[in-house]
Image (cartoon, helix red, strand yellow):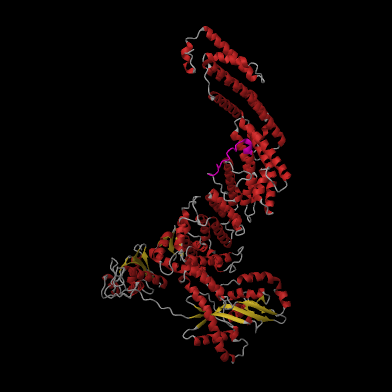
Amino acid sequence: MEEQPNTPFFNLGILDSLTQDSVNQIIESYNGFCNTTQSLLSGAGDLSVGADFVSHIHGLCKFGLESLVRDHFFYVLEETFERNGASRLWRHFDPYSYVAASNKNDDLDIDEAEIQSVLYTALEEISSEKQYQEKCLLMLVHAFQSYKDQVSGERHDLGERNYLTSKYQWIVSSVLMATLPRNFPVILHWYFKRRLEELSTIMDGEFQDDTSQNKDGMDLDEKGNVGKCNKASAMDVDESYNDNKFLENNRIVKSIGKVVLGLRNLGFTSMAEDAYASAIFLLLKAKVYSVADDDFRSSVLQSIQSWIQAVPLQFLHALLVYLGDTVSYKSTSSGIKSPLASQPSSSCPGIDTPSEGLVRWKLRLEYFAYETLQDLRIDKLFEIIVDYPESSPAIEDLKLCLEYTGQHSKLVESFISALRYRLLTAGASTNDILHQYVSTIKALRTIDPAGVFLEAVGEPIRDYLRGRRDTIKCIVTMLTDGTGGNSSASGNPGDSLLEELNRDEEIQEDAGVDDDFNTDDRQAWINATRWQPDPVEADPYKGSRNQRKVDILGMIVGIIGSKDQLVHEYRTMLAEKLLNKLDYDIDSEIRTLELLKIHFGESSLQKCEIMLNDLIGSKRINTNVKATISQSSQTSGENAISMDTISATIMSSNFWPPIQDEPLNLPEPVDQLLCDYAKRFSEIKTPRKLQWKKSLGTVKLELQFEDRVMQFTVAPVHASIIMQFQDQISWTSKNLAAAIGIPVDVLIRRINFWISKGIIAESPGADPCDHVYTILENLAETSKNGGSSGNTQELLGGDEEEERSVASVEDQLRKEMNVYEKFILGMLTNFGSMALDRIHNTLKMFCITDPTYDKSLQQLQSFLSGLVSEEKLELRDGMYILKR
Amino acid sequence: MAAINVQSVEAAQDNKTAPPKNVDSQSVLRRLQSELMALMMSGDPGVSAFPEEDNIFCWKGTIAGSKDTVFEGTEYKLSLSFPNDYPFKPPKVRFETTCFHPNVDMQGNICLDILQDKWSSAYDVRTILLSIQSLLGEPNISSPLNPQAAQLWSNQEEYRKMVENYKCPNA
């Protein structure tokens, strides 16, 4: 017996010593073992062969064939399990094989109770089968055990047994996995989803109750928590009601737990967890979607969080308790800090100390909720920003989500593509784009005070706006007031920008920093091109990045490129506005100018200041002139017009933008009046002289007809025209033009105003190109002649009234281009032929004083093609040459 | 009529700054720059000049023969090269196209007093070009660089033929 080895490794040594007898004995034992094993495993609970089974094992063990016994037993066990257990288990689900093809998210058309009972029976069956087999396995273990007791008398530890059971467990799960039909996970998933939905509607109702209770001002912290999970505690509210609910909840949780346990038993731990986790996530997603919806006016994060607390976490808690996982009541959660930990309601209701598993779940769920909400909001960011500032709660939500998830780059990418698709198109008006840009800046300033990704998002907008011609005009309009030229803008961006000016002023007063945004902007630009999202941990209120303050005005000016251009445009618009003023009330302009001065510096706005001072000076001079002139001229007052009706705006022409002046003969009495005024002015302000710009200004006039009186506010040219009809009721266009001193085509354009008002009628004259204009004295004639077309024409006439008294920026540009034309002609005269880029470079090189050449190659090209079409140049093989 | 509001303009004086007289290269550059601008904006018919691509000290000029002279209908290319102490020294001016003229040699050198001893810093590119243009029509026969041309000058018809020969040598 001493040489009988315990381990199979020495078996070879004893082969020789085997006698025929012993071989026979082995064979006999083995056959017996095989038979008993077979009958034991396949037999339905027949343990009568147990004694034989044990003795055969002992017989085999005697020859050191333990491993043979073990292997064969497991082989048979596996085969039996596959035949009896697995295939039978899956057969239960055969009727549902069609679901394998369907989508996970589809609602399956299966009765819930039916599937539950199928699951139950299937799981019960397999677990009883398994229990039986485990019993058999234990017999084997005991056989080994008793043999060893006999042989050596020593006690063995439980290692052998544990090894065998775990091996059995492993066999079970691998067999099941190998034979797993495709529909099973789907069914499982569907089952959990249904159960959870059921549960959530119940819990939701409770959650609603809680909220309403909360609104009633009751002590929720105590009661809500208690009411849900701890029925032993005293409750103020309807106890039985909550009890019923609790029981109902418990029933569902138990039924789920039973399934989960059954699955775990089979080694499907992860599959079960996957199934209920994905069900929970689906539920959460649906919840987030339904709560978030398209309403940006309220914050939803809080309610989602409380829902997570109330429904899925409750369920998980119950489930974990049921499964017996919630064993650690010690403070395991201290290491993992929930982002909600600071909130009083965050401690899991009804649980003194949340278990680590639960805290993990909570973090997972919250992250998922944040991410879902964030994705939802990012998708709709464009709409949210359109609605800004009404949508600021949604922005706040998004900010919190992003702080948690750190997926800022997702926002930037998605938003930029939305911008490109929806905003930066030819159909969008520049005003709208600017408005959206300002809203974007403001909204993103909330999310990211450091303005890190504002740069990235703003870049495509800026690029696009640079390509638009009316950008500067719109910006200046927005800066000065919202109602100036283009009033089509939705909302009132003008106010917002003025408000920005104010805000900026405050900042500057506080900080006392003179920000040179030109260099600032350049730096920001460089940074924007190599933008990287801030790390999540980075505190946006610290570090170097908050040096870059978000300066809306600076960003807007950044679109234009230089403040000079902006100031230039502003000056033009200011001139226009001042010239159209009837009184000298310039308070709002002064205010705007002062704000602009703070931002752009005194020197660049000096001319504008002089313009405003001119207005102030005009008021004074005007009063002065009128006061001193009244005695002298009133004596000769054979005409009815008194000096009081006139008020002059006196401009220092050097500081105003170029004025468009058309020659115009004013009616004699008015002209006389202006002469007197100018004379008096030069007396007062020698050596200065007054030169009237007769075509500019505004005339208020009243027309008296036979049957009516009409009042108009018109340009001087219109007044002059209608004045001519005072003495003579009918004019030919040529004579009228001569009398007023304007070209005929201009006259025809201008007189349309009166025709559209139904005051003058046009009829063809003797000469086909010489029209006859007649004044219509009474309404009857008007309706007969021009009334019908009056309304439509008024629209046209109205448009024409948008005449500008100040040379527009485009006109000034044309003047600049005229200089370039001379240069281009000069260089082509001397060099013969030149290519586009050489012309460009040469202009850059030599055209550096007043006006400096600052055009792009594209601008030059279009200018040159203009010269080609004017037949000044010729383009041949890409070379420009002079046309002779 | 109720009220009239018309604008007026106050006259103001605009005094021009005198050209700088320093010799440093910045002021030379500025001077040439302003001369270029003046030349471009003046629009004198028949004379033109422009700096070469990258060097403002080297200009190419173009002169058209004045009307009612034998040079009518011709066009001459010039090169102007400015010294570093311009305008205290005159620029070197040469004809690039051969010019059959008593005061221009076959290498294109010009004999013109204002380009030598009579130079004054008051002259500029424009006046130089105009002087050369008028020199074409009124040569100084007494000190010729091209004696053949000087001799032929009296016979304007023959001279015209020579000029046209030079203009298109193949004809």
Left or right position of A192 against A864 = right
Camera sees residue A692: no
Residue A677 placement: quadrant: bottom right
- In-front residue for pair A368/A743: A368
Q: Is residue A95 above or below residue A863?
A: above
- Looking at the picture, how far across and down is residue A105, in whole percent? 65, 40
x 71%, y 71%: residue: A788
Q: Is residue A76 above or below residue B2?
A: above
Residue B48 placement: quadrant: bottom left
- In-front residue for pair A568/A733: A568
x 42%, y 59%: residue: A837
- Give the overall secondary structure of the magenta segment: loop
- Looking at the picture, how far across and down is residue A636, in whole percent? 59, 91
- Looking at the picture, how far across and down is residue B22, in whole percent? 31, 72
Left or right position of A16 against A90 = left
Magenta segment: does it hold A587? no
Residue at the extreme bottom of the image, as rendered: A635
Camera sees residue A719: yes
- In-front residue for pair A721/B68: A721
- Looking at the picture, how far across and down is residue A340, in whole percent? 58, 49
The magenta-colored residue range is A319-334
